[in-house]
Image: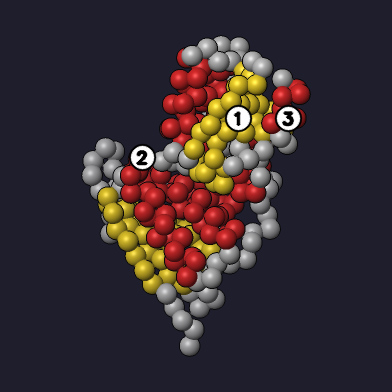
Amino acid sequence: MEINTKKERDVLIVSVNGRMGEVTAPEFEERMRELIDEGETRFIVDLEGLEYISSAGLRGLLSSTKTLREKNGQIFLSGLTGAVKEVFEISQFISIFSIFESIEAALAEM
Amino acid sequence: MKRVMFGNIKLPAKIEHLDGILQFVKDCARDEGFSRQRISNIELATEEALANVCRYAYSGDCGDIEIRCRTDDDRRLIIDIVDAGKPFNMLTLAEPDLTADISKRELGGLGVLLIRKMVDGIQYSRKDNKNILTFILSNREKRDMSHS
């Protein structure tokens, strides 16, 4: 898994590439925790480069979102495709997250 | 006579071995000509089952996990996931509440939900003090992918 961050206005764009499963999800959670501790509160997590997600990955996203909510933060997701989108649909995570087609579309709503 | 494939792998039930086991299962499916999408489905179902064994089966003690892959006469892939941990049948878990709000959303049962959507058949048996979870997968894409 590769995580890249980029600041756009006051929004932090976190791009996750590769795989987010049992082995790699804790890495994502840890990185998000660091960013939240550094004071970031507005996130777009872009999953366009993500090829694979399991329930461990969903758990990582959910726990980061809950932490952020306690700090009145905001998280949008973007770029879900293929197998990743399918897992979001099956788990109904599609209805509990704010999901956008692209980073640009998410930014416009932030 | 149709060709029947067999293969197995046995490793300690630790998260660090998970990728190696998944690679073995993916190789079996690829050798049998499974599509990329079905291999991805197989990988997800297997990871969910393996993660359960690594987390809960041995309650912190050491133990092994064994994966047996074979094909049946219909060229379906049969995967047995075997552990000698405490008896546990994940098929008895209640379906998670998929309508809960984000703050109340729990993740128990999500793994088994994903497994059910990925595989064509699933069985559990307890034999010789071992849990045996069996997946049956055809190379055809499952049509019913959305939750209903």
Q: Residue furthest bottom?
A: B1
- Label 3: few (<14), some or many (≥20) within 10 Å? few
Question: Which residue is under mark 3?
Answer: A104
**Marked residue chain, label 3:** A
Q: In the displayed structure, does residue A94 sit left or right of residue B39?
A: right
Please report the residue visible at 51 percent of the width from the left and 33 percent of the height from the top: A3
Please tell me if label 2 and label 1 are on a single chain.
no
Residue B113 shows in the view: no
Please report the residue visible at 46 percent of the width from the left and 46 percent of the height from the top: B48
- Residue B30 image point, x, y percent: 49, 66
Q: CA distance from mark 3 to mark 2?
A: 39 Å
**Marked residue chain, label 2:** B
Q: Nearer the viewer, residue A102 or A71?
A: A102
Name the mark nearer the viewer: 1 or 3. 3
> Which residue type carries mark 1?
Val
- Residue A80 image point, x, y percent: 66, 40
User: How many dots with numbers?
Assistant: 3
The quarter of the picture where residue A97 lies is top right
Question: Which residue is under mark 1?
Answer: A45
Point out the tag, 1 or 3, that comes first from the N-terminus: 1
Numbered disc 1: secondary structure:
strand
Numbered disc 3: secondary structure:
helix
- Residue A75 image point, x, y percent: 63, 23
Q: Which mark is residue B55?
A: 2
